[in-house]
Image (cartoon, rainbow, N blue to C red):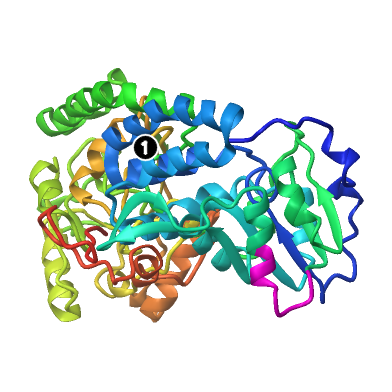
Amino acid sequence: MAKPYGKNPTSFFPAVAKCSSIGRENHTVVADMDGTLLLGRSSFPYFALVAFEVGGILRLLFLLLASPIAGILYYFISESAGIRVLIFASFVGIKASDIESVARAVLPKFYSSDLHPETWRVFSSCGKRCVLTANPRVMVEPFLKEYLGVDMVIGTEIHVFRGRATGLVKSPGVLVGTNKADALERAFKDDPKPDIGLGDRNTDFPFMKLCKEAYVVPTKPEVEPVSQDKLPKPIVFHDGRLVQKPTPFMALVTILWIPVGFVLACLRMAAGILLPMPLVYYAFWALGVRVYIKGNPPPPAKKSIGQTGVLFICSHRTLLDPVFLSTALGRPIPAVTYSLSRLSEVISPIKTVRLNRDRAKDASMIKKLLEGGDLVICPEGTTCREPFLLRFSALFAELTDELVPVAMSCRMSMFYGTTARGWKGMDPFYFFMNPSPAYEVTFLNKLPYELTCGAGKSSHEVANYIQRLIAASLSYECTSFTRKDKYRALAGNDGTVVDKPKISPNKVMGC
């Protein structure tokens, strides 16, 4: 939340647009966060993300009900008191490790899409970067240090008892006004005072006065955030269920929609499970699920003349990729998976076969399945939400020369149908809970024989070629990242699947 100015802030300090960013390599910059480094002046959406991802819909509802009290305190009594209410409603009783997990895996995606261009121009030009914020340090530090190269983060410290947040803050309290200035003096007591101070409101003025130069960031609603390609590090992996930033209005819409969306999801899934596959396409459209088909899919293999099936090589967006491939073809295609929750296996409308991660056993199993007809595999081994393709495992290229690349893309407007930290069994429910989810299935041309292993190409050459082919079709970027890279980044482990939802906090499920 942001407190309105009593006077025009530029009457105290010049606007940030007047700050030169040339020759700042040896300078130190200190910036506030909400309204300064970020365009948004409210921290409610980020507290809401933590509340929903850790505590679910009830915690989000509690925060939403507490937000009017926080607003009244913030605007009319004390900025610090308003922030304390948000911290209490979001954090009380939550494990500190869960807050850290959300800060690492979920928040960076939303923070990175809201960077102020003028502030970033100055901030990124300086050799030493410090952020001074009223937000809890545990929420903002992973993003600032890992993605923006910030050297020092000074924020409000939350109180923890026996591993759980109490909802209170440590002394000296919330960092606003003189508390910010005092914190900055303590941090730089043995160093020269900072060269540049950047803030956006009158409660930032005390710390800005301690800097050699100070500039204010005026509120300009029409300013566009920094584009993703200009960030020092791209956001390839991120987690969390919410697609849109949960402003108070969006949080209310989400809470009201979830009961309706869950019933709708059950209907959609029942249609996919119970109806014959040729009818699923039409049932999905009738229930608001859009399926777009491009390209020319190959006909089914003719067993009577000894034909073996083709292997569909799909990019991996959600665990429903094989289901929508089957929907597009009008016939069920068995899928080999690297990992799948037990619930997802039970409710799947197509046959799923789990790989053992033993190269010889997996190769033998896939060859046997191909003898019975067509098969689908997602060689990335895990999903990626952003426009990137992970490294393709080369095993599939050694098993058959009948390869058909398929570019899969999907659209979700409210909930993500994938997770690294949560229970994978809920993935299809969340996907179908979107008001109008969509899948686009693009069949590319069958790989020519001269580009297969049978013609002398190595399996890695074939896998890399198909990766590039699918990436070009989707306008995605190829990477060498793997499943382990994703799970180490988001969950701190290698992504081992656990069948039951009740697991220790340091374990995750998923693919």
Q: Is residue 236 visible?
A: yes
Q: Residue at x 46, y 34 (%)?
A: 246
Tell me which segment is drawn in magenta: 184-193
Q: Position of residue 179 (x, y in %)?
A: 62, 54
Circle 1: residue type: Phe
Is residue 399 magenta-colored?
no
In the rendered image, the vertical position of residue 231 relative to residue 453, given as above or below: above
Q: Closer to the camera, 229 or 17?
A: 17
Q: Residue at x 82, y 31 (%)?
A: 7
Quarter of the rendering containing residue 271: top left
Residue 419 as seen in the image, left or right of residue 180? left
Q: Quadrant of the N terminus?
A: top right
Q: Position of residue 241 (x, y in %)?
A: 35, 43
- Count of numbered circles in the view: 1
Q: Quadrant of the C terminus?
A: bottom left
Quarter of the rendering containing residue 314: bottom left
Q: Closer to the camera, 429 or 478?
A: 429
Residue 345 as seen in the image, left or right of residue 397? left
Q: Closer to the camera, 327 or 174?
A: 174
Q: Residue at x 39, y 81 (%)?
A: 458
Q: Position of residue 87 (x, y in %)?
A: 43, 44
Q: Is residue 416 visible?
A: no
Residue matched to label 1: 415
| Principal secondary structure, stretch drawn in magenta | loop
In the rendered image, the vertical position of residue 9 relative to residue 450, given as above or below: above
Q: Residue at x 14, y 59 (%)?
A: 503
